[in-house]
Image (tube, helix red, strand yellow):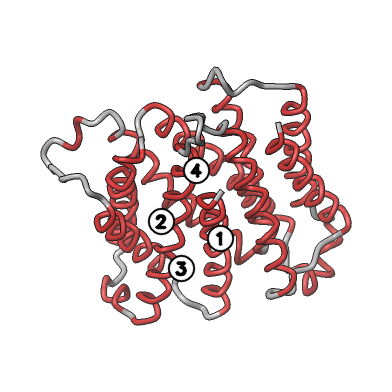
Amino acid sequence: MIFLVFSILSSAAIYIIFKYLDRFKINTFNVIIINYITATILGLLLTKTQIDIFSIYKNAWFPYSIIIGVLFIMTFVLIAKSSQIVGIAITSVSNKMSVIIPIAVSIIIDPLDVLTNLKAIGIIMAILAVFLSVYRKPACRQARRKIEFDPRNIYLPIILFLSMGLVDSIVKYAQHYYVADDILPLFTVILFAMSAIAGLVTKLLRKTSFKELLDIKILLWGIGLGISNYGSIYFLIKALNYKNSLGNTLDGSIVFGINNLGVITLSVIIGLIVFKEKFLKINWIGIIISLIAIYILSKT
C-alpha cells in the first residue's frame, strides 16, 4: 500500500537526520522546533477545511491533538538523544517495537481486530526482542569504541519504547473515533502547532536566544525533518483510514505491524551501511526476533 511505503520512508528519514545532526554538531532542539513549525505549515497548505480559531476547540478530536502534540516533542527529544548516544538501529528497534502497545489498544477498541493465538505469540516475541536488542554486558565499556554505547544509557531506548507506544495508541484512538480523511490535515495542523508552541515555550524557559532558529543550517535541517515528520504521521493515519474496493479497512494491528517492520528493516540497513554501527551477537538475535515478531503480527 502506497500510504505505508511513504510512512516507512518518512519515519526512516527522521532517524537519519538525527544521526547527521549529531555528526555535524547541530543544535538538535532548535532543529526540532523548526521541524514542527514546518509540519504546521504543511498541514495548513493541505487542509481544505476553513479554520475557525474561536470554535476549533469544540471539535471532539481537539484534546487529543493537544496531548499528541505535547508528547510528540518530548518523544522527539528522546529519539534524537537515543539515536546519537545508543545508535540509529537500536533506537529504531526500541521505538518501533513499541508497536505492541497500539496493537493492544487497537484490539481493545476495535471489535473487528481480534486477538488470535498467533498475535499473542507475536506480542510476546516483540517484548523479548526489545530487551535483547538493547542489552549490553558491563564488559562492553572496554570495547566502547566499537559499540559506542554505555550500559548506563540503556534507559533511553526503554523509555522511548514506552513513550512511543503511548503516542501511537492515542493516535490510533483518535483516528478510530474522530479523524477521518477530510479532517486529517486540520488535525495535523493543531497537533504540530501544539508541538511547536511547546518547543518555543521550553526555549523561552531555558532563556536561550531565538535568533539561533534563523541560522541557515538550523532552518534547512529543520525543514527536512519537518517534511519527514509530517509525512510519517499523515500517511500512517491515511493507511489506517484506507478502505479497499469492498469498503473494508485494514486492522490497526496489521497497519502498525507492516509500518514498523519496514522502518526497522530500513533503519538497520542504513545504520550498518552508512553509519557502521556494531552489535553484539545477542543484539543481532534481538533484531532478528523483532523482524519475525512484526512479520507475524502483520500476517495475522
Residue 117 lies, with reference to residue 171, above or below; the image says above
Q: CA distance from mark 1 to mark 4?
A: 14 Å
Q: Position of residue 296 (x, y in %)?
A: 75, 37
C-beta proximity under 8 Å, tags 1 and 2: no
Tag 3: residue type?
A: Thr
Q: Nearer the viewer, residue 278 or 141?
A: 278
Q: Which residue is mark 1?
A: 9
- N-terminal of the two: label 1 or label 2? 1
- Rounded to the nearest angstrom, the CA distance separating label 1 from label 2 is 12 Å
Residue sitting at x 26%, y 76%: 211
Q: Position of residue 90 (x, y in %)?
A: 70, 57
Disc 3 packing (10 Å; few <14; some 14–19; many ≥20): some
**Disc 2 residue type (three-letter):** Tyr
Quarter where residue 283 is shown: bottom right
- Residue occupying image coordinates x 64% and y 56%: 91
Residue 231 falls left or right of residue 117: left
Q: Is residue 2 left or right of residue 32?
A: right
In terms of sequence position, does the residue under pointer 2 or pointer 4 come before the other? 2
**Residue 86 in sight:** no
- What kind of element bears circle 4? helix
Q: Amino acid at mark 1?
A: Leu
> Could you classify mark 4 by the number of other residues whose Cα lies within 10 Å: few (under 14), some (14-19), or many (20 or more)?
many
Q: Which residue is mark 2?
A: 230
Asked if the residue under mark 4 is in contact with the one under mark 1, i.e. CB atoms within 8 Å, the reply is: no
